[in-house]
Every structure is written in structure tokens, then in C-alpha cells.
Image (tube, rainbow, N blue to C red):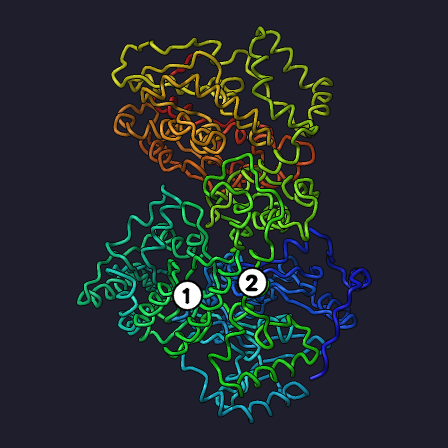
Amino acid sequence: MSTPHPISSDTADLHADLAKAVRGPVRFDTATRAMYSADASNYRRVPIGLVTPLDPDDVEAAVSVCSTHGVPVLPRGAGTSIAGQAVNTAVVLDFTKHLNRVLEIDPEARTARVQPGLVLDALRDAARPHGLTFGPDPSTHNRCTLGGMIGNNACGSHSVAWGKTVENVHALDVLTYRGEYLQLGRGVPATGRVPDALRKLAERAGDGVRASFPDLTRRVSGYNLDQLLPENGFDLARAVVGTEGTCVTVLEATVRLVESPPVRALAVLGFPDAYLAADHVTVVRDLGPLTIEGMDAGLIAALRAHNPAETASRTLPEGGGWLYVETGGATRAEAEAAAHAVVTAMKPYGATSVVVSDPAAMKALWRIREDGAGIVTRSPDGGEAWPGWEDAAVPPERFGAYLREFDALLSQHRRRGAYYGHFGDGCLHIRIDFDLASPTGIADFRSFMEDAADLAVAHGGSLSGEHGDGAARAELLPRMYPPEIIAAFEEFKGVWDPDDRMNPGRVVRPAKLDEDLRVFVGMPTLPDEPVLAFGHDRGSFTRATRRCLGVGKCITDHGGVMCPSYRATGEEMHSTRGRARLLFEMASGEVVTGGWQSPEVAEALDMCLSCKGCKRDCPVGVDMAAYKTEFLAQRYRRKLRPASHYSMGALPRWLRLVGRLPARMVDGLNAAGRGRLGALAKRVGGIDPQRAIPPIARRRYTGVRRSRRHARTADASRGRLLLWPDTFTNHFDPTVAAAAVAVLERLGYAVELPPREVCCGLTWTSTGQVDTARRVLRRSLRTVEPWLLEGVPVVGLEPSCTAALRADAAELLPGDPLAGLAATGVRTFAELLAQHADELRDGVVTQGLRALVQVHCHQHAELGNDDDRAVMAALGVEAEVLDSGCCGLAGNFGFEKGHYDVSMACAERVLLPAVRAADPAVAVVADGFSCRTQLRQAGTREPVHLAQLAAHALGLTPTS
């Protein structure tokens, strides 16, 4: 093997040569290097730069330039690798933007030709019309790429039926570091330098491979030297699978497709503990299911702590450990019959059970399992858990014994972790509460990893059963393989990459497993004195920046709310993950310098909508809206702020002044807002010129209806409640309040109003004016204190304000008893109405109503919409609740100068097309003022609030 070229320190020449040779983007800027310095593992390595090739010619050009300069290359998938193989001091090749297509589906041959940046779910969607699918399906299936899966030899939950990626690869087109283009696979002539050298290696090492490779379906550790053996067809394509980018760059792949049962069912089996669940997987395997997944009670406890409103786990059968056993069939009855056969077979073993075949219910149950990696990384008090010993695998028949000894090992090291995994294949996933921030903790981390490796090998297992070796486990390979096999691995790597420039330090000649740990090497230098409480992160902003582990759920293109700006732009900087990494690097100060004045962080957060979607959708509960508030508060402390902070950030203050004006003067202001004065006001106030200023109501609701704290309606049998007249409803849409009061009084409530205007402070919070937000909120809570102390329900109509009172108040006013009372005493309009479903059902006058529903982002994040669905069902409304994500306006975001295009792109993804396509008779329900404003300004029909829909269904004519 030749001596590796030294890495050039002159990256400016490298950057210039790449930019000249490659047509796709070439980025060596600080923000890009910071964002690509980590994957979903514990490790951090700052890359040299990033190349986003447009096509295979671009890849060849980029590799050629890197080879000329002698710098390492790292082909990268979605960056969701857990073992650290997707980070290195190298030029990173990102295929996800352009080399991401299905090139061909051949239903007869049951194969697909794909590019390496293709997301797995896109392949599955393309294969579905033919009744086919790609068998391996990691929990990251909606963002992981085929190239990444090939690199890591990924598996997923259906490996018991369809195997690992290696069993599903037919052929590969690859490029070596020295520019050799090779076509690999069975049926492809294997001649030339590389095949000849590997054939000789197989002859010398064959007996050792046969003797030392464990007979295990989930052996992923090390290189696939077994694929070089004559009995396995000397398959060079499959030999390259699992090489983690250390040998070649994959340009194209031909993969096997399998028949996908059109209907599936899920038998969920409950056992007293996870050990007993593991003991019985071999019985279930004999029945030929599609999936055998397992979960421990610790995962369910973590899930419920993370999301108390979660309901799917309540349907699990009684137990402390569970198996998910998926079955398939041509019909629902056939799939259910197979699931019931599993239940019957397990009855002698005392398993409790439930069979689920409704697709929505199954999806909810699968989400528990798929979000496991994120859920168990944080405890409710901010305790941290980490990957590392993530996915060892042992023979399934030994899995129960292995789990018991593994738990004993955890106890011996005084560590804890909740686990889950592919129990049918003997593969365990776990996050462990390692201390990775101190030398003592890191020493124990190493000691545990060594002991865990010995335990897995003692049970005939593999150090990695799915996610590869990377930086986490490659150093431990000599504990699994004898020296002659380790030498064979090095020779195998040397045949493909004599210069050792392809993702060096991984698999062979590895870095130490306790080097480059991102928590330790990225220790914060920024003073940790946040203005927000960060109660879920033990009062620490820098601890909050570690919350993101890179699982990448924010880089999906559909479903949920997170992350709207990423879905509009496709830029990593605009993902929750990208922003979190920039904040982490800002706190560290090594790459992103300048602290709170960092222009890179400011640029990334400028496109954050503060929608809070990540707080709900991110399995780790990253709350980027809070991080943005903290950043803005610190950045502009005692400094001049952007104009929008003074205009829209203080909007309630301006509207309170306008509310004192006579109606004719308000009419005049609205007219002026549509003319030249409005254009001037927008320019001065930092509002985008393409935005219209929403018209202010001639009379605010509280100006018409005086406080009725002690008033009674004709039928006040239900007692008192207080309506929270938020700024937006009160000053822009008072008819919503009038409709709500009409419905509430029909139900027998005495509706009261505060004696003065109240505000949750959200506009100040979202613009980082935290001191003002505190004062406003404290004053408002003091105003409604009598109602809170007496336990009178406080009903909010605007989701963002209601969510602020329920969740944000504790961050602004930690320890304030009134903030605690608000968290429990404030209810949504739907939550109150849902208590009277029967009465609503009996009172319906207008039959056959239909609705298209846009759920406000803050409602999605903090409140949920189950009660809204229940109320509409009681009213006889046939409702379609859109899975549309954020409307794009998001409070002040869509109004701010420079945000209009992204704002509208968010709306055009799902919301606006759905509204345009809806029948004119269908009501468009949008409780959020931002959502209604976006719809109005997009020229669609007039949207309504749930209160207005309810009033219409009940035949009420609200009066203000």
C-alpha cells in the first residue's frame, strides 16, 4: 500500500479547483462546514467542504480534483448514521439534492435502478403500483437514502422476511478514488486490477472467513469478505455493501424488489418483561411473519413523558415488554387471520395480545417504534442518553439470555438505558446515559464499550447488527475477528483505495472510539446565562443545543409540521437539524465564532417560522422557536432592533391605541393602509411590500361587550367561564368571539370578560423581547387572577395565544404560581365543547356540513386537535383534517421583508391546492388568525373559526 498523501492545508486552491470543475454547488463556508460536522452519532469531525454534484460526471470531476490535491472524500447519504461514519475531515459529497432519482423499475425482473441520493420512501412509492417494495426499511425510511443504506448495509424492521441491504443488491456502478469506473455484480465480467486482486485475497483468506464469520443474519460488522467466496458467487457488488464509503463512491445501484402484501395486520404481544418477549421470538419466527419488533417498558415510559397527550401506547396490551408481529395477506381477513394465528401460538406462553388492522391505528403504533431512537435520548428532567453501543446482534435463540446479561452489565457500570429493537433477528437498540462531557465519564464509556463487545462476541454475535462500525465500533473489531481477518480487511480496503483517502479512519486503521466525541470536543465557551427558563434542559441553553442528535426527521418532505422552511427551500440550514448544529457550534466557538453576533446563526434562524412544529414532531423535542427567542434576546440586548420587532413585535400595543379611536377613524386607517401611506408604513415597519396590511375591525369585541364577570344568561346552569379576548380575535376578527359566546351561552355558561385588555405576550416573545413579554404576561395574569384562583375555566380562541398561556408562560415566568394555574386552567374552545358532545349533537339545526380543516402549528405542537375532531363529529360535520404543515404566515414571519416567497411556498405545498380543489360548499376551518390571513391574502374563500362553524350548525345568529 502506498503512503497516503498529506492533506493540503491550502483549501483555497482546492475550493477554487472544485468550483471550476464541478457544475453543482461547492461550499467551503463556515455554516456548511459546521452543519456537516456531525451525523446522528456521538462524533464530530469538521469537513473540509461540501460538493453537491449534479450528475455522475460531476462526481467524477469532484473526485478527480480531490485526488489531485490528495484530500479525503466522504460520500454521504442523509447524515442519519449512528456510528459516526458520515463525519470526517474530508470533502463531503452530498447526493440528496440532485442524484436522487428512480431511473427504472422493471416489474418483470423485480428490480429497480436508482441513484444514490434517492430517499427510500420514494423508491417504495415508485414500486408500490407494481405490488413491489424494497425489503430493508430502517425507521428513517422517509429520509434515509439508498446510497447510505448500501454504505451501512442497513436492515430495518422487515429483515426477518427480506434480509439486509446486501441481500437486496444486484449490481453497482462505482468510482474509485483514482478515477476507475467499475460495474459490479453477478453476471458482470469480473476482470481487471480490482477483481484479480480480490480473487487472490479470497483464495488466501477464504478458510479464515468461513471459520470466523458468525452464522448470523445480522452480521454487519467488518467488510463482507464472505461475498468473495466461490460459494457466494464472488459477488463484488455485495462485497462493497457495508463498506461505509471507505472503498468507492457509488454512482448507481440496481436493487432487488420483493412482493409487498397488499394488506397487513399487527399482532401486539405483551409479556411481563422484555426478557420473556425475547425468549419467545424463535417461536414467532417459525410462523413466517414480516416483522418481529420488540420494546421495553422504558421506551413507553419515555414516550409518555415526552408527550403526555399521546394515545397510541394506551392501546398496547398489558405487559412490561412487547413484540410487534406484522403479518400480510391478499385481503384484510387473510392478514388478520395470520395475526390471530400468532396470538394463538403464543397463548401457551402467557402473552397478552391485541390485533390491529386499521391502517391509521397501525401507523400510530409504528410511530412509537420508529421514534424510539429520539424518544429515549432525553428524560423529562433533561437527562441525556447517547448511542454508541447501539445495535449489537446475537443469534435470536440466545437473545433473551443476552438481554439479561446485558442489563447486568449496565448495572455493573451504573448506567441506565431503555431499549427496543429487531428482536426477531436478535438485534438490540439502546440509548445509554453515558457521561460524555468529562474525562472520567469518557473512561467509563470506553470500559463499557469493551465489556459490551466481549459480551456480544461471547454469545456468537456481531458488534453491529445494522448501523455499521464507523467511529463507534471499528476499534473493537479485533475483539470479534482474529488478526488474520483484520489484516484481510485492511488488504480489501487497500485494493479499492490504495491511497487510503476514502473516508479514512473507519473500519480499518480506525480512530479511537473515545476520540472526537462531540459533547467533549465541542464543550461550550459561551456563557450559559439564558433569559428563558429552559426547564426541560435543567436551565441550560447549551444543554438545549445538545438536544438534537441528528435523527433527521426534520428533513422529510411531507407529514407533520416540521420543518416548513426546509420543505420550501431544501437547504440544510433551514432544517431544525441544521439550525441546532449551528447553535451547538456557536456555543462551542471553534468553527462558528462571534457568539450571539454570529451571522451564520442569524441567517439560519431568520428563516425559522417559530412554528413549534419541531417541539412536537422531533422525537427529541427540539424547540427551535424557543432557541430563536433566546438568540434574538441575547443578540439585541441593549441594541437597536430590526424594524419588524418594533412594529409587529409590539402589535398589541399599537392595536390597543387604535382600539380607542372612533369607528370612522379606524375606517380611515384601513383605507390609508391600502394606499401610499400603507406602502410607507410597510417600508418603515419592515413589512414585505407584497403583503397587505390586514384590516382592523371597526369596533373591537371588548369595546362592544363590557366585562360580564358577574353577569348571568337566561340559562347559566353550567356556571361561569372567562373568555380570553386575545389581541387578534379582539381587534381583527371580533365576529369569532361573538360566535363563540353565542355557542357557550347556548350551552348554559355565563361568559365573562376581563375588566381590561389582556395579552399573552407572544409577539414580544417571538421577536426576542423577553423582558417586555414578561411584563405583559405578568400583568395579564394578574388581571385574570381571580378567575384562575376560583378555578373558573379560561377559554382561548386563538391557538397561538392559548398555547402560549399553556406552555410558554412557565418559560417566561418560572416559579410564578399564576403561570402554573394558567397551564392547567386555560382551555381551548374545542376542549370545553367536547365535554358536551351529546348536547351539541341534539342541538344541530344545519345538517350535512362539510369542512376542510387547517390545524394551527402551535395547536399541533402544544394542544392537539382530538377535541376539535370530536366537536365536529358531534355537530355532524364531515371534516377532512389536512396534513398540510404550516400555512407559511406564522405570525410576523410571513409579513417580514424578504420572507414572502418562502411563506407562500409553504402554503402552496398542500394547503392552498387543497382549498382550491375543495367544493365551494365545503367550509375552510382555520382557528389561527395567521392561517386565516394567509388564506384571505392568497385569494381563496373566506375561512371560518370552529366557533363560527359551531354557531352555524346550531342555528345561532351571533351578535356583538
Q: On the rendered structure, is 90 left or right of 763?
A: right
Locate residue 233, reporting x and y percent.
Answer: 52, 87
Circle 1 SS class:
loop
Is 329 located above or below residue 867 in the figure? below
Circle 2 SS class:
loop
Q: Residue furthest left?
A: 348
Numbered marks: total: 2
Q: On the rendered structure, is 329 left or right of 564?
A: left
Locate residue 464, reporting x and y percent.
Answer: 46, 71
Q: Pick whichever, 733 or 281, lies toward us.
A: 281
Neighbor class of circle 1 (other Cα within 10 Å; few <14, some 14-19, many 20+) is: many
Locate residue 724, reporting x and y percent.
Answer: 43, 20
Is 262 located above or below residue 485 in the figure? above
Res 233 label: none
Q: What amino acid type is highlighted by mark number 2?
A: Thr
Q: Which residue is mark 1?
A: 260
Q: Earlier in the sequence, mark 1 or mark 2?
A: 2
Contact between labelled residues 2 and 1, with CB atoms less than 8 Å apart: no
Q: What amino acid type is highlighted by mark number 1?
A: Ser
Q: Which residue is pictured at 32% across the width and 64% down the height? A: 327
Asked whether residue 306 appears in the rendered view, the answer is yes
Q: What is the CA distance from the residue labelled 1 to the residue labelled 2?
A: 20 Å
Neighbor class of circle 2 (other Cα within 10 Å; few <14, some 14-19, many 20+) is: many
Q: Which residue is pictured at 45% across the width and 32% down the height? A: 814
Q: On the rendered structure, is 698 left or right of 745?
A: right
Q: Which residue is pictured at 41% across the width and 72% down the height? A: 393
Front tag of 1 and 2: 2
Q: Quadrant of residue 897?
A: top right
